[in-house]
Amino acid sequence: MTYPLFIPSIFSPASYEAGEIYSLTIYFIIAAMAVLLVVIGLLIYVVVKFRAKPGDGEPRQFTGNKVVESFMIGIPTLMVGGFFLLTARTMKHILPPAPNRQPDVVITGHQFWWEARYPGTKAIVANEIHLPVGRRILMHVAASDVIHDWWVPELGPKMDAIPGRTNHLWVTIRKPGVYEGACSEFCGAQHAWMRIRVVAESEVDYRQWLSQRGQNAVTPTDVAAQTGAAFFNRQTCGSCHRIRGTAAQGNVGPDLTHFASRKTMLAGMMPNNRDNLHRWLHDPQAVKPGSLMPRFIYPKDSLNVLVAYLSTLK
Ligand code: CUA
């Protein structure tokens, strides 16, 4: 099968924070190129100028040169000091201390997916996270099991997600779009499939999305989906998953209230469609080995109605 391509870049910043990191990176690259040019230049000069000719004896030997040594120590010290100050300044700008207020969004890393809650609303989503453009968003970043790391390169710095601890991150997105990210701390067998999809949109669209996501799940109308809903409850899927507005209130696995509205499934691993869903439910460990979803042996045809039900959860 083909997996979605992921080409993150810190060279196309889309937020104020990523822009600051980009500028700092450019300064570092220019300085590194300058050092490289000077070193290579001197090396070539010495090799050509002092090349041994036939009949040359041993060259004059000497040690200690105060002028050369003070340059050798002084220039690197000045450069490192300068970059230390520049980095400290950038960090101060993009990561000021968290104020004592409710965050706009709370991100939690799980093996192997991301959850986003929006305090003050009922919305809980997985992997596809909407944020508004044009204002400074305060994010809380935490983890439920092991250490993960939130990173969307076009939107700013990484932030460790650590169990038992809440870190924070600021993001001021400048232009609407879809920004891809990934877990950046090795966290287990499926670390590679802990993708992040941030959908940045206007304040109006964001509000609308948030209020839609805050609503309870729709009650299915067609027979297959209704049978699937009943089966979902009988199978105790709800001891791990939540579908708001139903008896399913688990909080181990992803919230499925609006599952079918996601473009991808399994944290960005594949497009969210009936075929993939069917394959996944049939044998989760064959599709994403090491994930926490166990393999259930379903009675004949029950997989089809389960898929029918989950596909109605827009
Ligand atoms: Cu989560 Cu790596």
Image (spheres, rainbow, N blue to C red):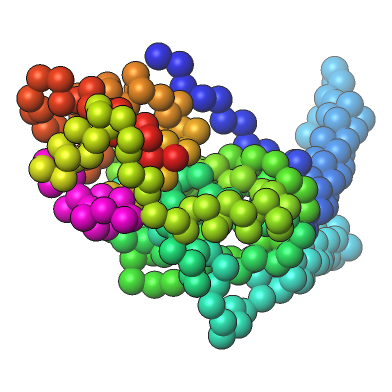
For the stretch drawn in magenta, the main secondary structure is loop
Considering every residue shown, the one lying at the far top of the view is 1
Q: How many marks?
A: 0
Magenta segment, which residues? 235-252
Q: Is residue 108 left or right of residue 310?
A: right
Residue 20 percent coordinates (x, y): 77, 58
Residue at 25%, 50% in the rendered image:
241
Splitting the image into 4 quarters, where does residue 285 fall? top left
Query: Of 70 and 265, which appears nearest the observer?
Result: 265
On screen, residue 198 above or below 203: above
On screen, residue 42 above or below 47: below
Residue 18 percent coordinates (x, y): 72, 54
Residue 107 percent coordinates (x, y): 46, 60
In the rendered image, residue 244 lying in the magenta stretch gets the answer yes
Residue at 42%, 36% in the rendered image:
260
Q: Is residue 181 left or right of residue 193?
A: right
In the rendered image, residue 291 lying in the magenta stretch gets the answer no
Residue 198 percent coordinates (x, y): 58, 46
Q: Can residue 27 be seen?
A: yes
Q: Can residue 56 be seen?
A: no
Quarter of the image containing the C terminus? top left
Considering every residue shown, the one lying at the far bottom of the view is 100
Query: Of 301 and 268, which appears nearest the observer?
Result: 301
